[in-house]
Image (spheres, grey):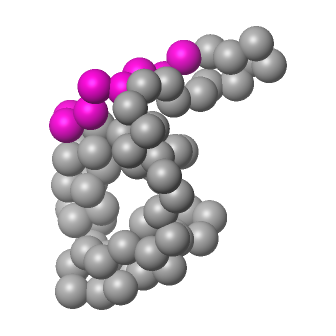
């Protein structure tokens, strides 16, 4: 799954590098979005052979973790 754009806080935001933090949303809203993704996810982040942290598990949840990365 790729997140192309998302709707939060009454705004539609294009997903670009670090767009959640650059969106102009209040920091508390940003934290709530991060917490909702992390706390409602069974996927995990593992160290890959290339020494990079890579999400593993359900495709949708992996996409959301990549969105946060």
- Residue 9 locus on image (x, y percent): 21, 79
- Residue 14 locus on image (x, y percent): 50, 79
Q: Is residue 38 left or right of residue 64?
A: left
Residue extent of the magenta highlight: 39-46
Residue appearing at x 59%, y 71% in the figure: 16
Q: Is residue 7 magenta?
A: no
Residue appearing at x 42%, y 25% in the figure: 57
Q: Is residue 42 left or right of residue 20?
A: left
User: Which one is nearer the viewer's eye here, 11 or 27?
Assistant: 11
Residue appearing at x 51%, y 71% in the figure: 4
Q: Is residue 16 visible?
A: yes
- Residue 45 locus on image (x, y percent): 48, 23
Q: Is residue 22 visible?
A: no
Marks counted in the figure total: 0
Q: Is residue 42 magenta?
A: yes
Q: Quadrant of residue 5?
A: bottom left
User: Which one is nearer the viewer's eye here, 16 or 61?
Assistant: 61
Residue appearing at x 48%, y 52% in the figure: 1
Toward the right, the furthest residue is 50
Q: Is residue 33 above or below residue 51?
A: below
Q: Is residue 17 above or below residue 48?
A: below
Q: Is residue 47 left or right of residue 22?
A: right
Q: Is residue 68 above or below residue 44?
A: below
Q: Quadrant of residue 6?
A: bottom left
């Amino acid at each position: 799954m790729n997140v192309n754009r998302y709707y939060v806080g009454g705004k539609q935001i294009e997903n670009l590098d670090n767009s959640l933090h650059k969106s102009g949303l209040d920091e508390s809203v940003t934290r709530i979005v991060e917490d909702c993704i992390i706390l409602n996810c069974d996927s995990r982040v593992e160290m890959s052979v290339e020494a990079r942290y890579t999400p593993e598990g359900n495709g949708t949840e992996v996409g959301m973790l990549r969105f946060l990365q």
